[in-house]
Amino acid sequence: MANINDIANYAQESARQLGIKKYDIYGSIVDETSVQVDKGEPKQVKASNRAGVTVRVWNQDNTVGITSTTDVDLNGVKLALQTAWEASLFGAKENVPDFSPESTAPVADIPNEKAPQAPVSRLIENLVAAEKELLAAHPAIAGVPYNGLSQKDIDRFYLNSDGALRTEARSYASVYLYSKAEEEGKKPRMGGAFRINRSLENLDLPACLKEAAEKTISHLNYQKIPTGKYRVVFSPEAFLSLLGAFSNVFNAQNILDKQSLSTPESLGTQIASPLLSFSDDALHPHNVSAETFDGEGTPTRRVEIISNGVLSNFIHSAGTAKRMNAQPTGHANIGAKVTVSSNFYHVFPGAAAEQEYSLDTAENVILIDDLQALHAGVKALQGSFSLPFDGWIVNQGVKTSIESATVAGDFLELLKSIIYVEKEPELTPGGVCPRIWVDELSITGE
């Protein structure tokens, strides 16, 4: 498979032959191995080595054509440039994308070494051992139906005809374990955990196993709860999933498309409790899959979005930044069109809380661990949500699993109803966040 310097040379030579003056290419090369097991035996083993590039070409009328290909040899790159040039003749004439003004600016200097990949046999051995230990953790644990251990190497690059050439490489390994407990006369219960790190050697499998077992066991003695208004505590993962579901609040592309709860005039307004601050920080030291540039070659950075409850910034591509008289923030994805998406959330306390809360002393509060059915239960343009969840009712540190329940509310009202942001952050797949206390939300029980 061609390396990135070869692809850059192919592009330069092919563009010269085709008379193309302005183009850019973004792509990646991914080497991935993953395994799943079932009752001590390999259930699925997958390995892939794949490449893909997206090519944009501007013609003399400054309209742009886009194409993508997995064929990254000389002929494939040349054909992609030719196809993109032909498509440019039919390109849109309004809000035409352009090179990022920061496509040649320096990027952050962070380690980008790849870790050596472990053999598949070792992945299987580790996962079989984890499954065996999880099954032995409690007599009621009958199986681990969802599990997986994977390792991945990623090489990314961006280049353009103005001389930009960016490359980076990353490795990371991840594991997930979701166990199922069954007891006679009771509903099956599940619990799980996920871990990610830069290599298999650094992956904390014992901690993942322990968390999965503890969560599953904690859900065995469940009870119904009455419908009503409750003080609610969101786990870090639950709060970040809700934040992601309503990311149109700070996504500049959504705002320009009028598909957002915000408008351009929302900047500088108070949209949340002063106790809440959060940033989108692709370069956060705990982000093991950190990227130093986006699909347009713009350097990634820390962008403070909510500061003490005030909406401070939107996330931008080069195109949205130009239209809103702002700076690109490193959040662009190149595809059939340029889209904008978040990188890695960092939620932390804003203003000092007048009162601190603790699950050790709180009474009759709902601790939501995991929100479900976000694809169906979130109305992102209305700001409302109604979501089933896994969690516990907590009384002075004693957690009792909830049989089944749904939490409902309005997202912007929820942000303003935050009464405490805990100080101790936790690392999740989507970012770093502490537990978030919300004064009152509607809970529908049995």
Image (cartoon, rainbow, N blue to C red):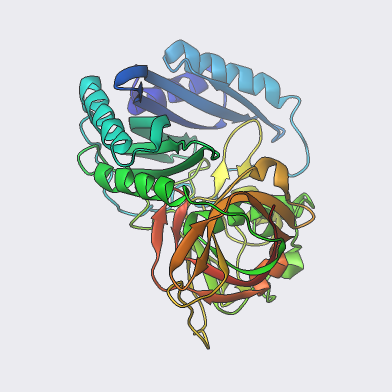
Name which quarter of the figure residue 289 lies in.
top left
Q: Position of residue 332 (x, y in %)?
A: 56, 45
**Residue 43 falls in which quadrant of the image?**
top left
Q: Is residue 130 above or below residue 267?
A: above
The residue positioned 59% from the left and 30% from the top of the image is 56
Name the spot of residue 168 as percent of width and height, x first. Answer: 34, 40
Q: Most extreme residue toward the front, as rendered?
A: 185
69 or 214, which lies in front? 214
Q: Which residue is pictured at 29% across the width and 22% down the height?
A: 40
Check the image and name the residue furthest to the top. 75
Relative height, residue 32 to residue 261 (above, below) = above
Does residue 256 appear to the left or right of 205 in the view shown? right
The one of 39 and 173 positioned closer to us in this rendering: 39
Side (left or right) of 6 relative to 442: left
**In this orientation, which residue lies closer to the viewer: 354 or 220?**
220
Q: Residue 175 placed where, x, y %?
A: 35, 37
Q: Is residue 172 left or right of residue 297?
A: left
Side (left or right) of 45 relative to 182 = left
Q: Is any part of residue 74 visible from this angle?
A: yes
Residue 90, by quadrant, is top right
Can residue 289 be seen in the rendering of this structure? no
Quarter containing the N terminus: top left
Q: What residue sits 64% from the left and 42% below the top?
A: 373
Q: Position of residue 6 (x, y in %)?
A: 35, 23
Q: Where 444 falls versus 268 (above or below)? A: above
